[in-house]
Image: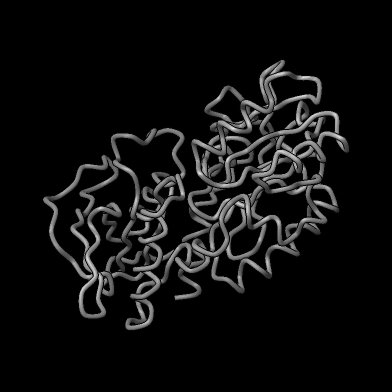
Amino acid sequence: MRKHKNMKALFQIDALSHLSPDTDSSLDIIKEGLKLGLNIWITSPDNLTFYAGRISFVASKLKDSSLKLYKPKKIFLEKFDFFFIRQDPPFDMKYISNCYLLELHQKFNKKPFFINDPKGIKNFTEKIFPLYFHSLMPKTMVSSSVKDLAYMFEKHDTLVFKPLYCKGGEDIYKFSRNDKHYLRTFQMLLTKYKSPVVIQKFIEKVKYGDKRVILVNGKAVGAVNRIPQSGAFKANLHLGGTASSTKLTKKEIDICNLLGSVLRENKLFFVGIDLIDQKLTEINVTSPTGIVQLRELYNVNVSKLLWEELMSIV
């Protein structure tokens, strides 16, 4: 691919010091962009200002792949070709307000191209988005009702409780119907997060892995099987899960193809979906990960594929 020295990309991410240089997907995309000659800038949601139909950021340009930064300066968003929304959840009012303002910017400006579209992020959160495809999921209910919880336990021996707007396996619990503590935990989640709880049938086959599939512009470009530690049920890599190679089944490919058209329609360019036992459990549109593991397992450079796809669009 030819160099793109005149093109600019702005990444709205968490502090660089908080990111792992060896495993973080955002840094992998950034480093690949630098190799292609793009001007890469870094900012955070706290540095956004909207005024008179324009958004400005206080942002810093990266010097090189060492990730050292030049002195921060004010710069207008429409000066960039690409804008990556890559800060981690929680998906709270701060996150939503940021998306609202970025969406408003689009009403008055043609640039930049968003990865992902702020309206899409706002409308399709990780654990609610899959409910559009509930027939592809394990049996799932979202509720604040103890009666509904009791109903789910009548139908299923073991359930998983999940907050609607957290990340990385945080505050996810598994209970059998005979466990004495499930009601206390359910009420704790309601109180702590002030929102309904995801109540989902537990899939025993998670012990064989939780597949993360990466989709770029609606097309599956690779999958990683994340296997939980012995005796655990959370497969998140930062919680001790291990990454292994895998192949998608025909059913899983069909799920990806079905989701792909919806993702493109809603301008959700870079997405990770999670599959357990060929069932859809999550659609990550905020800050999907897995790029580094795909390179390590298959020698597939997803970051390069992502930039190539972006260049073909813009």
**In the picture, residue 274 is in which quadrant?**
top right
Residue 157 as seen in the image, left or right of residue 301? right
Q: Residue furthest top?
A: 230
Q: Give how far across and how far down residue 276 sits, in percent.
A: 76, 40
Residue 176 as seen in the image, left or right of residue 291? right
Quick check: 96 above or below 238?
below
Q: Residue at x 45, y 66 (%)?
A: 118
Q: Give how far across and how far down residue 183 sits, in percent.
A: 67, 28
Q: Residue at x 61, y 32 (%)?
A: 172
Quick check: 103 above or below 92?
below
For this rendering, which residue is in front, 184 or 139? 184
Q: How is the image coloured?
A: one colour
Quick check: 190 above or below 255?
above
Q: Residue at x 58, y 40 (%)?
A: 163
Q: Give how far across and how far down residue 104 sits, in percent.
A: 36, 75
Q: Residue at x 78, y 24 (%)?
A: 176
Quarter of the image for the N terminus: give it. bottom left
Q: Residue furthest right?
A: 155
